[in-house]
Amino acid sequence: MTNSNRNAGGCLVRIAIVGGGPGGLFTAWHLNELCDRPVDLTIFEAADRLGGKLHTPTFSAAPVRYEAGAAEFYDYSPVGDDPLLELIRSFGLPTVGLGGGQVQVAGRPIANLDDLQEAFGPGARRDLIDFDTWAHGAITPREFFESGSDYTASATPAGRFDGALAGQASPTIRTYLEAMIHSDLATPPAATSVAYGLQNYLMNDPAYMRLYCIAGGNEQLITALATRISATVRLATPVERVATTPDGRWRLTTRSVEGCCDQDFDAVVLSLPVEALKRLTFADPDLTAAMRQHITHHDHPAHYLRITLLLDQPLGRAAGDDGYLMLEAFGGCCLYLESGREPDASQGVLGWLLGGEAAAALADRTDDELVASALDTLPAAFAAVRGQVLEARVHRWTAAVSGLPGGWQPLSVDHRHRPAGATHPGLFVVGDYLYDSTINGVLDSAEHVAGWLAADLIDASRETR
Amino acid sequence: MIARDHDQPHAADALGPHPEVPGGLPAGSMVRRLTLPPGRPFDLLVIPTADPTADPTADKAQPTNQAALAEQAQRWVRAAAESVAASSTGIAAAPVAIPLYGCYVIWAPSHGAVLGSPTRIEQLAGTLGEFAAREAELRDLEGRGDKLLATVESDAPAAFEFDDRTQAIRSRLAARFLEAVAVRRGLASLGPAVHVPPIHPPTLASQLAERLRDRTRLAERHELASDRADFSFQVYEACGQRAAEFGIARRQLGLEWAIVVILVAQLTLMLVEMLRFGSST
């Protein structure tokens, strides 16, 4: 039962959503959909734009888009319902499949078992098949699909991923796997679980999931959501303090160009990454303790760094049909061949996604240094790129995601979303770090919280009657 | 499924002259003639590239003529496919070109080409040949299904009412029903090859097969052909039902008349016997 009951008698229920990223917007969308009466939603966003990690800016040298944040979505429809894909389609946004998977190991491109055998001998081929068989046995497509839910919390393999790699993969295969999954994992194998590591390996199997992006830019999802939700959006307005009022409501202290401001709400949804949660002040000691526990449990920061180049001509045949390939450089990074997404483009776009410790270590370097480092990693097929660069952009996503979503010991779904349920039932959290560090995961999280709030409102209405 | 000409030496004569290897290709290049169902020729240009250990993604690092060779192969396939189309349907399907990790594969319904290192070329040629056979089988079934569909509308009334006039086309309807069964059977047996799930971890052959199926929309075409064949089958099945009922009704009518005649004869005999018995007493 939330504090929103207080206004169930007839006044408009006021709900604050802190964070205007995908999680905040999904929560608002679901609240609009699920509540049996209008609610007064306010979204507070610290930045001057909505969308968070979904960001598709345009180069200044030419009107060409590129993905600065999340480059792709995961399509789970081969296994079960995919609410994100359904939502994207319901907005009429066209999607494009994304294929690839070639991995550079010891300077050799490995795209399939034949390449592996040619480069490292038949033993390596056998070893990969053995590892693959083990991985498929450890997590089935259904368990992969349900990952993050209570259903699989006890079924997933326990332990650290580096231990599993050491036990199940030969050194060659381990090098190959680390290069293959590092940019998705964004954390060293020692800092994450077997389950999360294996999920990042198994996602390369189309029987588990497929990759896609939105034609014309992933940020269109944010635009579509923002134009459809009914909420007051306060940009460049970070929330600094969360407190309770004597009458049991919530008081948020925000800071904007107009100065500090206090506003009262019936319920609060914190849709922020863990790093941003750390910066919030909670007035109540019990709430402070509960939130500290929540943050400690989920504090496994993972980092990304994106370097994107605009080229004066589209990428040639060297790129083939693939949308991306994995390089061994930076501990394993992903090279996105973005011009492949727009076949009629007259310019090319090439993007590096660096993850994990390499991204954190390089984040302090200048853009020029990063671009030079990135260009040095290009395979011979892309040798001509060096002379074709029109513009370069760098985006740093330090501690933007979790390298161990759900924590070492996943909590129940309810506990995850309401850290201080016993003392402060009106405070909810939404985030991809509660599920699988994906946009799909944050949609699940938002749907759970919105459903909970909407059910509380319906219950409160009945009690009042 | 597919046969090479050297396995069937006489097939080449029936399928036309064996094409020449275009000039300027590397040593070891050859044109293989395969026989696809239902007896169509498929000419496959095989071009082994020089350096088997070169970086397969590295088009620029490989001999610069790799791109030129791919262009030449594409021109050969396009020209050959157009000439075949001009002599038959008049419609040429655009060749599908697939760059695949340093290899290059081009496919058109009657011709194909593969470029790759000598260690991979046989694998690629085998996969392309196998795909071409499946595609040809599907194309043939699509054509047969289309022919059936064209006659369905004129034959459909027989599915509702069957009389002496329709009795005249009974054997034709039966032949079309059998054709619908054959098309459905063909599509059903082709199904597993068309809808084969992606293999993981992939092999070069599985990647090529997957891309070829994807680019030629084989699964969608198979589904559409199956739907059409099902529709024709249902109509001709109903025609068969009506024809059978008509035949049974006719036989029943004859039987009824025979029974009537027998009964009349029996009554007559009984009457005669009664009269004889009455007159004797």
Image (spheres, coloured by chain):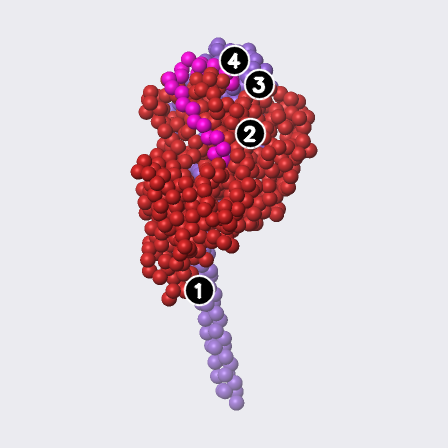
Chain B hue? Answer: purple
Report the chain holding disc 3.
A
Determine crowd level at label 2: few under 14, some 14-19, many 20+ residues with C-alpha closer than 10 A: many
Residue at horizontal 44%, vertical 14%? A386
Amino acid under label 3?
Gly
| Chain depicted in red | A
The residues bearing labels 4 and 3 have C-alpha atoms spaced at a distance of: 15 Å
The quarter of the picture where the N terminus of chain A appears is bottom left
Is disc 1 surrounded by few (<14), some (14 to 19) or many (20+) residues within 10 Å? few
Furthest residue toward top: B24
- Residue range of the region highlighted in magenta in the rendering: A376-401
Rendered image: mark on residue A182: 2
Tell me, for residue A281, which label it has, or none.
none
Tell me how far mark 1 sits from mark 3, CA to CA: 86 Å
Q: Amino acid at mark 2?
A: His
Q: Which residue is painted at 60% across and 29% down in the image?
A: A177
Evaluate whether label 4 is on the same chain as label 2. Answer: no
| Callout 4 amino acid | Gln
Q: Secondary structure at mark 2?
A: helix
Q: Quadrant of residue A221?
A: top left
- Please state, as top left, top right, bottom left or bottom right, where the C terminus of chain A lies in the image: bottom left
Q: Nearest to the eye among marks 1 and 3: give it.
A: 3
Q: Is residue B217 above or below residue A422?
A: above
